[in-house]
Amino acid sequence: MSRQTEILHSIPVDELTGSISVPVYQTSTFVQSEPGVHKGYDYARSNNPTRKVLEDVIANLEKGHSGYAFATGLAAIDAVVKLLSAGDEIIAVDDIYGGAYRLFTHVYQKFGIKVHYVDTTDAENILPYLNENTKFIWLESPTNPTLKVSDIATICSYAKRVGALVVVDNTFASPVAQLPFELGADIVIHSATKYIGGHSDLVAGLVVVKDAALGERVKFTQNSTGGILGPWDSFLVIRGIETIELRVREQSANALKVARFLESCPQVDKLYYPGLEQHKNHEIAKAQQNNLFGGVISFSLKNDTIEAAKKVVSSTQYFKLAESLGGVKSLVCQPALMTHASIPREKRLLSGVQDSLIRLSVGIESPEDLIDDLRQALSQIPVLEAAELQNI
Ligand SMILES: *Cc1c(COP(=O)(O)O)cnc(C)c1O
C-alpha cells in the first residue's frame, strides 16, 4: 500500500452514521447511563471523539504508540517539558525554535530545569554534556532558519548510554519525510500549524510517544493542565493530513528547483537547503529524510544589509511577507526583523541569522512562477562587484 493510500484510510469512516468525513463533536460533556457508566467519553477536556481521531491518525502517521493534540505547538512542547523534575537537564540543539528557547529560559529555568545548547550537527558534541541528570536530548532537524541537520540515529545511540530520552521536533521535516521513531527517538513533537495543517488556517500542536508508559504520562499532563485542541481545529488538522503526502512532495520538489535557481543568482551569498550537495549534512538528510528536503530555504545576500533584504522581501508578489511556514501558499520572511527580532544582534549573528537573511516557505504554486517572482525581486537590488563588497 502506498503512503498516500495508508494515510487516507487511517482516517476512519464514522461508525454511527457512515459519514465519510470526521464529525465535529461540539460538546463539553457526555451523558452517562449510570454514574461512571459511559461510552468512553465523560468530559471534553479529558477526551473528545473528534480529537481522538486526530490523535490516532498522528500516532499512525508517525508510526508511534499514541498521540495527543494541544492548542499550539508550544503547548505540546510545554506538556513534554512537564514530564521533568527540578534538577533534570536537557541537551538541546543550539538553533532551537525561539519559542522553545523562551519557554526553557524564562519559564522553566526558575523551576530548576537546566538546558545545555549544543551544535548537534556533529553528534559527538553532545558527549561532554551527557550525565546521569540528562533526561532529554532535544532535537530539531532541520532547524529554523538555517536548516541544520543532525544525525538522529547516532544521537539516539548516545542517549541510551545514560538512559536519556530523545525528543524530536519534527515540524520542519514532517512525517512524510522523516520518521524519528524509526531512528530511535522516544517522543515526537509537531507544530501542526505548519506542514501537518498545511493551509495557514489554524494553530495546533501534537505529541506522539513510542510506548504505552510514556503515553500515560503525557495523557496525564494533557488532562491535568488542559491545553487541549478543540474539536473544530482537530477536524481541520485531520482534513489537512488527508493531503500531506501530496503537499510535502510537491513543496520539496518545488523548493529544490528554487534552491538551484538561487545557487545561480549573483546577489545571493550563503544558501541553506539540505537538498543541495553543498549542505554540511546533505548525505545524512538524504538518508534520514526519505530524499525529501522540505519546503524551507534560507539565504543571505552579498549586500548583507537590513535594507537590501527588506527591499527583496517587500518586492515579491507570490511569496507573501509573513511569519510561519508550511502552508500551500508560499511565504517569505526576514528573520532579523520578524521571527528573530527579539534576539540581540550579536547572538543572532552567531547563530547565522545575518541582517540580510531571507527565509522562504515554498508552497505549491508552479516553480517557474516562484522563480520568476524571486528573479524580479532580486533584480530590485544591485549586483555588487568584488571591489564594492570589500567596502561593506
Ligand atoms: C512554529 C514552531 C513551533 C511552535 O508552534 P506554534 O504552533 O506556533 O505554537 C515549534 N517548533 C517549531 C520547529 C516551529 O516551527
Image (cartoon, rainbow, N blue to C red):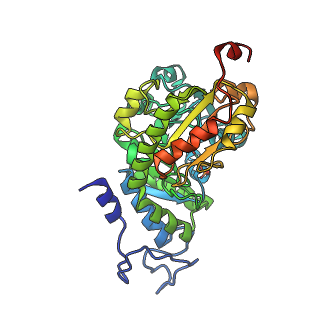
**In this rendering, would 192 be left or right of 16?**
right
Vertical position of residue 317 compared to residue 348: above or below: below
Q: Quadrant of the C terminus?
A: top right
**Residue 58, located in which quarter of the rendered image?**
bottom left
Q: Residue at x 54, y 23 (%)?
A: 129
Q: Is residue 105 in view?
A: no
Question: Going by the image, does 290 lie left or right of 140?
Answer: left
Question: Does 243 appear above or below 21?
Answer: above
Q: How many marks?
A: 0
**Residue visible at 35% across and 81% down in the picture:** 18
Give the quadrant of the N terminus: bottom left
Q: Is residue 331 above or below residue 113?
A: below
Residue in front for this viewpoint, 208 or 111: 208
Residue 193 image point, x, y percent:
56, 55
Residue sitting farthest toward the left: 1
Q: Is residue 256 left or right of residue 226?
A: left
**Residue depicted at 56% across the width and 62% down the height:** 223
Residue 241 location (% of width, % of height) = 43, 59
Looking at the picture, tell me which residue is in the foreground, 270 or 239: 270
Nearest the viewer among 345 and 377 is 377
Q: Is residue 40 above or below residue 256?
A: below
Report x, y in % for residue 342.
75, 38
Do we see residue 114 in this rendering? yes
Can you give x and y, in whole percent of width and height, for residue 162 in the image?
45, 29
